[in-house]
Image (cartoon, rainbow, N blue to C red):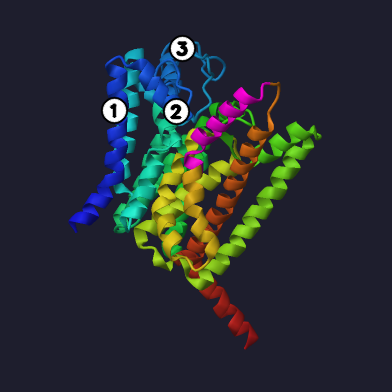
Amino acid sequence: MTERLVRQAFPAIIGTAFFLVMVALYCLGFIPFYRGIIKFWGIYPFDFPFIDTDTVLSAIRCINRGVDVYAANPCDVLKRVYDYSPLWTVLSVFPMTRAWLSPIGMGVDIIFLLSLSLLPVGRSWRNTWWITAGIVSSATLFAMERGNNDLVLFVLAVGAATLVCRSDKWRLLGYGCALLAGLLKYYPMTLMLIATRERPGRFMAIAAASIITVAVFVIVTWHDLVRALSLIPTGSYFGDMFGSVTLGGGLTERLELPPVAVKIIRLVLSLLAIGIGVRLGVRSHERGVLTVLNERERAFLLVGALLVLSCFFTAQNIGYRAVHLILVLPALSVLRDTSNIRVFRYALPLAIGLLWSGAWYHDIVTISGAVVRHHGYNLAQIGAWLVREAMWWSLVILLVSCVADLILSSNTVSACLCYINRYNYKEKM
C-alpha cells in the first residue's frame, strides 16, 4: 500500500520539484540559466513568464477602461486582440491590474501541478516513469511558462474524470466541470460524451440540460462570440503547430498545389483516420482490449482522448496543447503491457514522443539549419516534420479507436444496441 501511494504521488512530486527549481532560478536572478533550460526543452521563452495568462488579464484591464477588446487590445504587450470565449470576461468584476499577473499565473501552474496527483496510479515503476516523462516534457513546460488557459481546461478535465467515478451527485458535478471547460474554450464540449456512462434516461436529462445551458450562453454572448470565433489565429505549418490541417497545408505549400488542396487533403485524411479508428475500436471492443483497465483509467483515457481529438480535428494548435496527452498516459502504459492487438502497444511511445516533440523537432531544425545554410526548409527539417505528422495521425487513429471502444461499452450505448437487437429479433420472428 505504501509503495502504491508513492507511485501515485511520484509524477506530481517530480513535476513540482522541476517547477520549484525554475521558479528559484528566475526569482534569484539566474535568468540566463533559466532561459537556457527552457530553450533546451525546445521552447522560446518570452521576456517575462505567463504571457498567455496576460492575454486574458490584459483584456480584462482594457474592458474595465471601456475598450472593445475584440477590435483592439492596447493593454496587451503584443497588442493581441481578445479571441477567447466571452465567458472569461466575467473576470471584469475584479479591479485587474498588471500586479495580478504573477500571482494568477503562478496559481494556474500550481493548481495544474496539484491536479497531477489525481492521475491514475502507474501499475508499476516502469509505468510511473512513463507518466513522469510526460509530465516533465516540453509541452508541459511550454504550457506552464506561458501560463496558458489550457491548463485550466486540463484541471477541469481531471476533475470530470475523477468525479464521474464517484456517486450520482459527484458525477453531476463532474459533468458540470466538463460543460464549463466547453464554455471556456469550445473544443472541450465533446467531454460531455462521458455522460454516456449513465443509463439512457439520465443521459438524456443531462444532455438536455447541457444543450439548454449552451443555447442560453450562445444567445446571451452571440455578438461577442461570433467576433471571437472569427479571430482564432493560425500559424506556420512547419512550426510548433499540430492539427488535422497541418499535413495538408504543409504539402500544399511545399508542392505549390492549389489552395483547395488543403481542404481536400484534410478531409480525406480525417475521414480515413476516423474510419480506420472506429473499425479498430469495434475490433477492440469485440476482443475486450480495454477491459484490462480499471474505472479511473478508462475515465481518464476517454476524457484525454476526447480533448486531444477535439482540438486536433477542429483547429491548428500550438504545441502546449499536447499537454492533454498526459491524461491518457496511465491507460496507455497498461495497454502497452497487456494489449492483444499489437498496434495499441505503440500508443504510449507515440504519446511521449509527441509530448517531447517540441524539444527533438526544435533540435533537428536548429542543427540542420546550422549545417545547411540556405533559404527555405532543408531536407532534415522536412523529414522531421513528416515524422512528427505521421506520429500524430497514427496516435489519432489509436485514440479514435479507444473512444469508439469506450463509447460502445457505455451504459447508454449498450442499452440502445440491446434494444435495437431485441427489436430486430422480434421483426425476424
Label 3 or label 1, whichever lies nearer to me, is 1
Does label 3 or label 2 sit earlier along the sequence? 2
Specify the amino acid type for callout 2: Phe
Q: Is residue 333 magenta?
A: no
Q: Residue at x 42, y 51 (%)?
A: 329
User: Residue 427, image x and y in percent?
Assistant: 63, 83
Q: Which residues are magenta?
A: 354-373
Measured along the vertical axis of the image, is residue 99 above or below residue 294?
above
Disc 3: which residue: 75
Measured along the vertical axis of the image, is residue 30 above or below residue 202?
above
User: Residue 204, image x and y in percent?
Assistant: 47, 58
In depth, the one of 411 and 341 nearer the eye is 341
User: Residue 164, image x and y in percent?
Assistant: 35, 55
Element class at badge 1: helix
Q: Is residue 364 magenta?
A: yes
In depth, the one of 330 and 79 nearer the eye is 330
Position of the N terminus by quadrant: bottom left
For label 3, the crowd category at 10 Å Cα-Cα, with few meaning under 14, some 14 to 19 and many 20 or more, is many
Disc 2: which residue: 40
For label 1, the crowd category at 10 Å Cα-Cα, with few meaning under 14, some 14 to 19 and many 20 or more, is few
Q: State the residue lying farthest toward the front.
A: 371
Q: Quadrant of residue 366?
A: top right
